[in-house]
Amino acid sequence: MTLDTAASPAPTWTVVCLCAGWCGVCREYRAVFDALAAAHPQVRFDWVDVEDEEALVGDVDVETFPTLLIADARQAYFFGPLLPQAGVLERLLVNLQRDACASEGASAEAQALWQRLHTARG
């Protein structure tokens, strides 16, 4: 499975993983997440510890780890928990990239979080 590698040298899509340092699932998923990042340099992968970056996460209540936010430069398209498996994330990202123009995007809460993250991390 390949991800969209179109044109721009700068990543146009971002995958943000919201996790916590105390979470065993998160610790195990970190290696998978980092491997996907290395395999797909055309996509930006950011790891956000919800406790270490509480001000950035704001009032967003993350109930299940890992929770992912997937966005392009304009808006967030997915925000929610995801099975911590590489293939699941990869398929979701491919589908979102393919269908983004037909999507209404994620919730207002996800859009606000994406704007804070995008502003803070560029």
Image (spheres, rainbow, N blue to C red):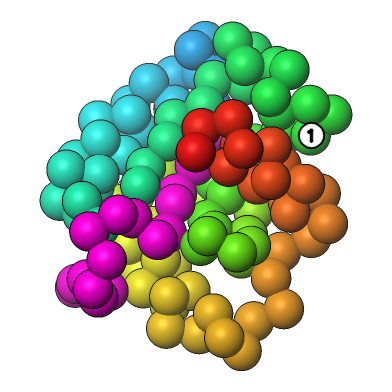
Magenta-drawn stretch, dominant element (helix, strand or loop): loop
Give me the residue at 25% from left, 75% from top.
Answer: 6
Viewed as shown, does residue 62 lie left or right of 50?
A: right
Viewed as shown, does residue 118 lie left or right of 106?
A: left
Viewed as shown, does residue 60 lie left or right of 114?
A: right
Q: Position of residue 116 (x, y in %)?
A: 69, 37
- The segment highlighted magenta reads 1-18
Where is residue 75, by image quadrant?
bottom right
Give me the residue at 22% from left, 59% from top.
Answer: 9
Q: Position of residue 119 (x, y in %)?
A: 62, 37
Relative height, residue 45 to residue 8 (above, below): above
Q: Is 117 or 93 nearer to us in this picture?
A: 117
Q: Position of residue 22 (x, y in %)?
A: 52, 10
> Does any portion of residue 24 appear in the rendered image?
yes
Q: Position of residue 102 (x, y in %)?
A: 61, 89
Q: Is 25 or 3 nearer to us in this picture?
A: 3
Q: If the image is split into quadrants, where does the N terminus sit?
A: bottom left
Where is residue 61, by image quadrant?
top right
Give me the residue at 73% from left, 17% from top.
Answer: 55
Near mark 1 (Cα within 10 A), the count class, few <14, some 14-19 or many ≥20, is: few
> Does any portion of residue 17 appear in the rendered image?
no
Q: Amino acid at mark 1?
A: Val
Relative height, residue 68 to residue 20 (above, below): below
Spot the residue most to the left.
Answer: 39
Q: Is 9 or 39 nearer to us in this picture?
A: 9
The number of numbered discs placed on residues in the rendered structure image is 1
Viewed as shown, does residue 60 lie left or right of 86?
A: right
Question: What residue is shown with label 1?
Answer: 60
Give me the residue at 62% from left, 16% from top.
Answer: 53
Is residue 3 one of those drawn in magenta?
yes
SS of the residue under disc 1: loop
